[in-house]
Structure formats: C-alpha cells, structure tokens
Image: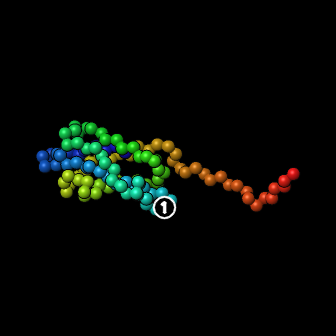
Amino acid sequence: MILKKFYSKSKEHTKNLINGVVIEYQSGGKWVQFNGGKVIKTGFNADDDRETEYVIDFYPPFLATEVKAYIPRSQRDHDFVCGRIEYLIEGPVAAPKPEVVNTTKEETVT
C-alpha cells in the first residue's frame, strides 16, 4: 500500500498526519481485519515533502476480493485528515483450485 500526504491551501491543514491505519479485507464473503485489527503505523513525518510516498508491505500477504483502510481518530493529528491511498496488488488473482481426490474407490493390496 502506498500513502501520500494531502495538503490544502489552508495553512491549518498543512501538517495533518495519518499516524496509523487499520486494514480490512473481504475473503470468502466476510470482512476480516488484517493482523487482528492492530493499527499499522505509517511513518508520516510533518517535515516530509508532500510528494513523499510511504510504502507499507503486508506480511503475511492475504487473498481478498475487496480491501479498505480506515484511519482511527486516535491515529490523526486533527479532526480533518485525508491522504492518498493506493494499493499495489501482486500475486494470484484467485485462490488455488482444490484438488479432488476420489476416496470411494477401493484399492486392492497385493
């Protein structure tokens, strides 16, 4: 995931930081919180340039049909905070197909 700061023209919003995010993803028709819902720290720094990109890798990786990130109030420096979030998707686009094993056929031992 890539995060970038957002700056408005107002000086009031120039230092707003996203200090952490929580990731949820949909797998098997239900929403699952990544890493048990623990906050993932972003590493935002107030003095960094607005073009600085913060990259967060997910380990262990997960397979999902939808992904969302939300910013808990405790992880914001201001009531109003926003940024740009992009997802980098790698790997399989579908779960591996299960292997079917015939367990009804009797085998003869010689």
Q: Along the horizontal axis of the image, is 10 left or right of 53?
A: left
- The residue located at (80%, 59%) in the rendering is 106
- Kind of residue sitting beneath label 1: Gly
**Residue designated by label 1:** 29
Q: Position of residue 96 (x, y in %)?
A: 58, 50
Callout 1: few (<14), some (14-19), or many (20+) C-alpha neighbours within 10 Å?
few
- The residue located at (25%, 44%) in the rendering is 44
Q: Position of residue 23 (x, y in %)?
A: 37, 54
**Quarter that holds the N terminus:** top left
Residue 56 makes an appearance in the image = yes
Closer to us: 27 or 45: 45
Most extreme residue toward the front is 110
- The residue located at (19%, 39%) in the rendering is 47
- The residue located at (46%, 54%) in the rendering is 65
- Up the image or down, 106 lies above or below 91; here it is below
- Up the image or down, 99 lies above or below 53; here it is below
Q: Position of residue 78 (x, y in %)?
A: 19, 54
Residue 8 makes an appearance in the image = no
Closer to us: 89 or 22: 22
What kind of colouring is applied to the model shown?
rainbow
Q: Along the horizontal axis of the image, is 95 left or right of 76?
A: right
User: What is the quadrant of residue 88 in the picture?
Assistant: top left
Q: Position of residue 22 (x, y in %)?
A: 34, 54
Number of numbered discs overlaid on the protein picture: 1
Mark 1 element type: loop
Q: Along the horizontal axis of the image, is 94 left or right of 44?
A: right
